Image (tube, grey):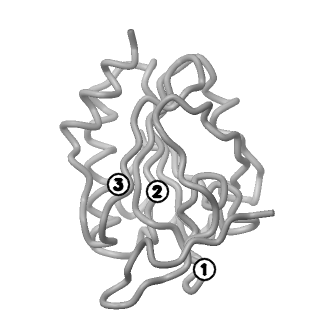
Amino acid sequence: MTTIRDNVFKLGDNFVTLIGDEVKVGDAAPEFTSVIAGWAKVNPLQDDKGKVIILSAVPSLDTDVCDRETRRFNEEASKLGDDIVIYTISCDFPMAQKRWCGAAGVERVKVVSDVLDAEFGIKYGILIKERRYLRRSVFIVGRDGKLTYVNYLPALGDEPNYDEVIAEAKKALG
């Protein structure tokens, strides 16, 4: 049975319903399947097993904050080695993600969609039931598959502390 959580997170002045349980540092990162352009299924944790993986969850790439966040992580990714991989995950359709990435010049961040089953959103406790999109959050998965960093942003309009995320990812390299 999937957990339904009320009175945890607000959109504006109103609480919304979050589906799934929060994860915490030290937990094994939940495996999930997403889709990319052409509707091909991918499993980011398996595809990049043994690397440090940053998972950046955003509501929609077509919003200002999500646009800025993904562009910034793309800049950061260009400075990192191949042992740190950054994913942006949203519930946008994969063809919309592909269009946005092309227009934005985003090539280093891997962008995947949770639109089909919302498996990522549910397993990480960030699916907003009323809107069927993801609560902004950032997770870092260490080489061993365990979460080394978890940050559920308090409001959708808040951006993560990029320097902190990159520093934690580098620390997780070991």
Among the two numbered marks 2 and 3 on one chain, the one whose residue lies closer to the N terminus: 2
Locate residue 111, reporting x and y percent.
52, 51
**Residue at the bottom extreme of this rendering:** 13
Viewer-closest of 100 and 22: 22
Please tell me whether mark 1 or mark 3 is closer to you in this view: 1
* Amino acid type of the residue tagged 2 in the rendering: Ala
Give the secondary structure at mark 1. Answer: loop
The residue lying at 44 percent from left, 58 percent from top is 101
Please tell me whether mark 1 or mark 2 is closer to you in this view: 1
The residue that label 1 is drawn on is 129
The residue lying at 39 percent from left, 50 percent from top is 106
* Amino acid type of the residue tagged 3 in the rendering: Thr
Among the two numbered marks 1 and 3 on one chain, the one whose residue lies closer to the N terminus: 3
Viewer-closest of 63 and 162: 162
Q: Tell me the crowding category of disc 1: few under 14, some 14 to 19, or many 20 or more residues within 10 angstroms, Cα based.
A: some
C-alpha span from label 1 to label 3: 23 Å
C-alpha span from label 1 to label 2: 15 Å
Instruction: Report whether 168 appears left or right of 34.
Output: left
Instruction: Report whether 85 appears left or right of 96.
Output: left
Please tell me whether mark 2 or mark 3 is closer to you in this view: 2
Viewer-closest of 39 and 169: 169
The residue that label 2 is drawn on is 57
From the viewer's perspective, is residue 108 above or below residue 69? above
Q: Quadrant of the C terminus?
A: top left
The residue lying at 25 percent from left, 49 percent from top is 72
